[in-house]
Amino acid sequence: MSDQLTPPGTQPFPAAGSQSGAPVPPAPSHGQYWAPPPPPVSQGYAAPPKRGNGLAITAVILSALALLVAVGVAIMIVGSSASGPGGALSGQVTPVDKGVASNDLQAELTKIITDDGGSVDTITCPARSEIGQGLVTVCKGSVDGYDWTGIVVFEDAEGTFVLNEL
């Protein structure tokens, strides 16, 4: 005979004087139903999940890549401003009476532009240019098939100059 208060598939509680030695739980009273016990509670703490280093490695790689790009851009900027159209070239002429004749200056300008990879069609400079620190001469002509203007800035009395091409 089955007790209505005993869960299905289990034995009813042992009698009060049983030999198992275990305490006998109280029997449910009239109108109460049996409920299964709650799940066991863990006594220790579970280890936190192991974190990977993927995010840190990605950050280091992206930082290194950004640094390489920045260095490359800086090199391109410095390289393009050192020569070529719009850049500065340097040269030297031999002064005569604190000046230089147009033929000598034109020959030196043609040489440094050609050495830089340009093709000089014509260059015309003033008949005589004074040489000294900070003195400026403007020459015009045609380089690589385009109109060309060169600003010659003398750095000293020995004829050293910087050519800025426009």
Image (cartoon, rainbow, N blue to C red):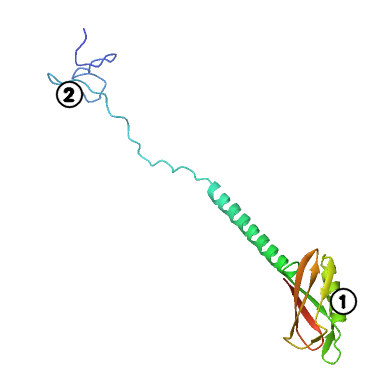
Q: Which residue lies furthest to the left in this view?
A: 30
Image marks 2 and 1: residues in contact by CB distance under 8 Å: no
Q: What element carries label 1?
A: helix
Looking at the image, residue 14 sits to the left or right of residue 157; the answer is left
Residue 107 image label: 1
Q: Is residue 124 above or below residue 36?
A: below
- Which quadrant is the N terminus positioned in? top left
Vertical position of residue 14 compared to residue 75: above or below: above
Q: Where residue 145 sits: x, y (%)?
A: 80, 63
Residue 101 percent coordinates (x, y): 85, 84
The foreground one among 153 and 121 is: 121
Q: Measured from the top left, where is residue 70 in percent x and y?
A: 63, 61
Q: Residue 110's image quarter?
A: bottom right
Which residue is the site of mark 2? 26
Residue sitting farthest toward the top: 1
Q: Quadrant of the C terminus?
A: bottom right
Kind of element beneath mark 2: loop
Q: Nearer the viewer, mark 2 or mark 1?
A: 1
Q: Mark on residue 53?
A: none
Q: Is residue 53 visible?
A: no
Residue at (53% x, 48% y) in the render = 55
- Residue at the location (83% across, 84% down)? 127
Amino acid found under the numbered disc labelled 1: Ala
Mark 2 to mark 1 CA distance (whole Å): 119 Å
